[in-house]
Image (cartoon, helix red, strand yellow):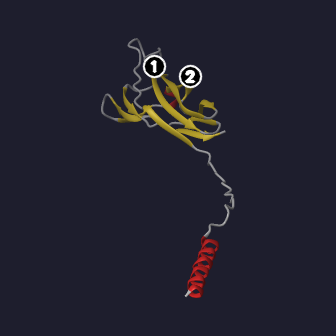
Amino acid sequence: MKKLALAGILVIALLGLLSAVAFSAPPDVPGDVYVTAQVEKSVWLSVTDDQVLLIAAPEGPALPGSDTDAQFSVKANWNWTLQAEPMADPAGFDFEGTAATIPASSVLVESSGADGTVWIDGGGSTGGTTVTVTYAPNFQWTDAPGSYDATHTYTLAFQ
């Protein structure tokens, strides 16, 4: 019986030793992850004040009238430029109800005629830059009195 008890103790000890070896965790092994981040060039333009009303001076259309500002918000993660594209001739109706147009040059954008491309502003990376653009009348005595409308397009681009 002693031999049997001794053999049982040896079997239990041997199983304990084997299970300790079999189930022990291997040592920590480091591993690296290489991260590549690719950030694309990005720009964002918001028109924050998009209504411009120009009125000729009461003394005559060739005299200075009302100047009005338009405002934009620019966000960019790279060098940028903002420009006003050439505007189509404003169209509408004269005071007799006849369809008419006036030349785009009758509208000034930053002191330049709206009939050509106008460079407005530029800069570097920004989380939000406000750009104010001044419109002014440049009406001529040959412009028929009336009410005219046009849409003016701006382009925000990378430098």
Where is residue 154? Give x, y as percent: 52, 37
Where is residue 5? Give x, y as percent: 56, 83
Work out whether residue 148 or residue 130 is closer to the camera in this orientation and state it. 130
Where is residue 21? Give x, y as percent: 64, 72
Crowding near pointer 1: few (<14 within 10 Å), some, many (20+)?
some
Q: Is residue 116 at all visible to an observer of this figure?
A: no
Residue located 43% across and 18% down the image: 66
Dot 2 corresponds to which residue? 111
Q: Which mark is residue 142?
A: none
Asked if 36 appears above or below 99 in the picture, the reply is below
Which amino acid lies under the numbered mark 1 shown in the image of this protein?
A: Asp
Which amino acid lies under the numbered mark 2 shown in the image of this protein?
A: Ser
SS state under label 1: loop
Work out whether residue 52 or residue 60 is closer to the camera in this orientation and state it. 52
Q: Is residue 113 at all visible to an observer of this figure?
A: yes
Residue placed farthest to the top in the image? 59
Dot 1 corresponds to which residue? 67
The quadrant of the rendering that contains the N terminus is: bottom right
